[in-house]
Structures are given as C-alpha cells and as structure tokens.
Amino acid sequence: MDENATSNYQQGFEISGDFPSQPPSKFFDDDGRPKRTGTLWTASAHIITAVIGSGVLALAWATAQLGWVAGPSVLFLFSFVTYYCSCLLASCYRTGDPVTGKRNYTYMEAVKTNLGGFKFKICGFIQYFNLTGTTIGYTIAASISMMAIKRSSCFHEKGHESSCGVSGTPFMLLFGGVEILLSQIPDFHQISWLSMVAAVMSFTYSAIGLGLGIAKFAENGSIKGSLSGISVGEVTQTQKIWRSFQAFGAIAFAYSYSLVLIEIQDTIKSPPAEQQTMKKATLISVITTTIFYMLCGCFGYASFGDHAPGNLLTGFGFYDPFWLVDIANIAIVIHLIGAYQVFAQPLFAFVEQTAEQHFPESKLITKDINVPIPGYKPYKLNVFRLIWRSMFVCMTTIVAMLMPFFEDVVGILGAFGFWPLTVYFPIEMYITQKKIPKWSNKWISLQILSAACFVISVCAAAGSIAGVINDLKVYKPFKTMY
C-alpha cells in the first residue's frame, strides 16, 4: 500500500479499489483498511459526547412548557424512538450479511446503498446542513457559558441586582480559534481521547446542574409547576402553543446523534459483529442520558416552575455557590470543544473525499507535508485541510455571532433533523434491507411511527421559527449582550 493510499484511509474516506476485500489479518480488516480498534466503551463515549450536550440545559425550560404530565412523557417517548431507530440504523452498517457484508462507512453511503441516488442526495443535504447547524449551536452555547463565568464573578462582587452585561463576540472568536487548531486532527478515528474527555465533562456539568436543582428544590420545600405547564397569564394562549411546539424541538435536539451513528460504528473492531456492539453502546448511552435528562428536566422544573430558565446553568437560576456554577460552565465549554469535532469530522471527511475524487492530481489536496515535532512522530500537514477546515470554523463562528438564540437554534436543529435522520431514513433502509413486505403488520407499524414523528417535527419547527422571528424584532447583529 503506497503512502497516498494510507493517507486516504486516515482521512476516513471510502476510496473504491484502493482497499480490496480480503480475509482479515493481524493488521487489516476484511475491507483492507488498517485494523479498527474501537470498543463498546469508546463507542459509548462518542455517543454520550454527541447526545449529552448543551441540549440538556434546556430541558427544565422544555418541561416547564409542557407540564408534569406531558414533559416526562415526551422525554421518555423521544428516548424510546431514538433507541429503537438507532438499532435499525446500526443494522444497516453492513449490506447483506451482518458479519461479512459490504461495509457502509458513512450515513450517506448507507442511504445510497439501500435507497438509491435521489434519496441519497436529499439525505446528504439534510445531514450536512444539520451537522453544520449543530456546530453553530455549540459555538453559541459555549460562548454563553463563557459569558456566564464572567457574569458570575461580577454578580459575586457587585450583587445579584447588578446588570453585569457581557458581550458574546470575543468568546465566540476564542472558541473558534480553539476549534481551528483541533480541526486539524486528521479524522474521526483519532479523536477518541477528545470524546472521552468530553464525555466526562458532560457528566460533570449535568451532575452539578442536577445537584443545584435538587438543592434549590429542597430550599423551596415544595414542588413548583403544574400538570399542564406554564400557565396562560404568564404567556398568551398563542405563545403557550408555540412554546410547547418549541419544547418538542429542544427535546429532539437533546437526543440527536443518529447523523453520526454510522461513522461511530465504523470505528468499532470485530468480532463480535459491529452492529451487536453498537446496539449495546446505544442501549447504555440512551439509558444513561435518559436518566440524566429526566432528573435535570424534572428537578429544574420543580425548582423554578414557570420561570425555569432557557439554559439551566447560564440563565442564572443559580447564583451560589458561584465557584460551583463556574466549574459547571467550564465543563460545558470543554465538552462543547470536543462535541464540535464529533459533529464536524464527518463533514470534513466528505468535502475532502469529494475534492480528492475530482482533483486526484492536485498536490494541494493530496500531498502531506511532514512537520517535525520533537519527541513525537512528524505531523502530516495537508494544506487543503488546513485552509478548508479553518474557513469552515470561521463561517460557523460568524453565523453564530449573527444569530445567537440558544433555545430557538436548538429547537430548529432538533425539528429539522429528528424526523428524517433519526426516524425516516433508518426505517426505510431497514425495510429495504430486511425485505419487509408492504402492508404487513410490521411495515404498517413502522410507517405509523414515521408519520407520527413527522407531525411532531413539523410542529417543533413551526414553534422554533416563530421564536426566532420574535427574537429578531429586538436583535442587533454582532452585539450579543447578556
């Protein structure tokens, strides 16, 4: 295998012909690629990093819009649908035999293999739009947490009634600078350490948010909130409807990771079959995240009632102990630094693969420059990767500065990506791969599930778009102040 072919693998691409199928060996898998090393725990870490993100902080607000009956019920419903459809999607990693069948290295490739070219193009647009939108949402969330750290110190020094206004623009630029550096990690396979750190951080801030919620609940001595959610009077009847729809989008975003599931599965070693490991990792991750989500959403609502903040740790439902709130927000920032890469790497790989296919003779795209690092192997610097990935990070940072509405952005992303990526395509691929007869009981059940999730997604999108329109009435670009 020549140096260029090895480099192509390291980018995480499918390059037809460079890696012919062969019996697995000590150093290579059955597709001719270097041996995969992922395990149940690394896959779980990737999933938890992708799932327990900034969305958890909006769940108290989402529960407040829906109330004690609908709030926990919707959380559980989304967890079940996410787990079930993720298992269907995991079955589509290999086409044909689950042990020896052809691998689909990306979500888009699985759609192309099972459903054909037209749906493949639609899926690609939705997936990469959602990946891009998620990185924008994470830039916004990270800057809000950094602002919260600065405001927390201000409140501690000047009192809780002080204005302590802080601009978000410098913090978004700082976050973008860090991501430019990390985006030069060549591929998904080399960010396992980053996912591990991010997963630990996600548990850290979720646990702190939960602990503060429990303490606030104990301090109140009573359960706030109502069976039906925020009352008319606090908001108008129309606002209540729109905000309830927006809550669906926020919850959908909190469970969103299907768009990187196949890419995560492609890091797992075998035997056992990759889908077996992935289904176990999905079960572990969804159960873990659902417990956290239920506790954070419910205790946050019990503590603040109708006035639950849109972001539990940056909306200043909690002021003290200020140092603990600061630790939680630092953990959020570190987690989002890693989560940004988990969602950006599949997009990076797609663009670089496409560029290499169209310009195979271009040294700008294909040639690596060895940069010596004392005490380590030389770093392979690719000029095209450096330029394009840096431009992408700059673009997401600028858009984040233009539209820094945390609750609305996560609602739109959740609504736009949940039905097609988490439900529709996995169900359709599973039906095709397993050759489930049309109008059979199983086919009808799967179609009913897909239709119900489509209706929920449409409602969530409508509510979140209404929220953005409302925010834009009073917003001035590049002047984010909290």
Image (tube, rainbow, N blue to C red):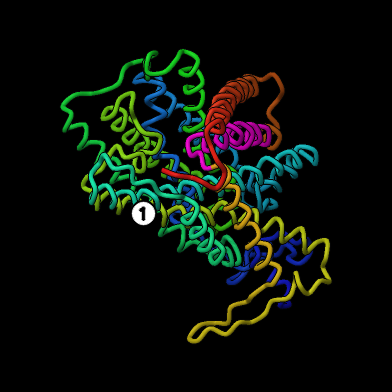
Local packing at callout 1 (Cα closer than 10 Å; few below 14, some 14-19, many 20+) is many
Q: Is residue 446 left or right of residue 147?
A: right
Looking at the rendered image, the quarter that the C terminus falls into is top left
* Residue, disc 1: 331
- Secondary structure character of the magenta stretch overall: helix
- Depth order, front residue of 203/40: 203
Please tell me whether residue 417 belongs to the stretch shown in magenta.
yes
Circle count: 1
Residue 235 sits above or below residue 374 on the image? above
Which residue: 67% across, 58% down? 349
Under circle 1, the secondary element is: helix
Give percent across and percent down for residue 311.
Answer: 39, 38
Which residue: 25% across, 41% down? 160
Residues drawn in magenta: 404-430
Looking at the rendered image, the quarter that the N terminus falls into is bottom right
- Depth order, front residue of 39/225: 225
Give percent across and percent down for residue 79.
Answer: 46, 33
Which residue: 24% across, 53% down? 323
Residue 276 sits above or below residue 459 on the image? below
Q: Is residue 190 left or right of residue 62?
A: right
Please tell me whether residue 334 belongs to the stretch shown in magenta.
no
On the image, which quarter does residue 442 sit in? top right
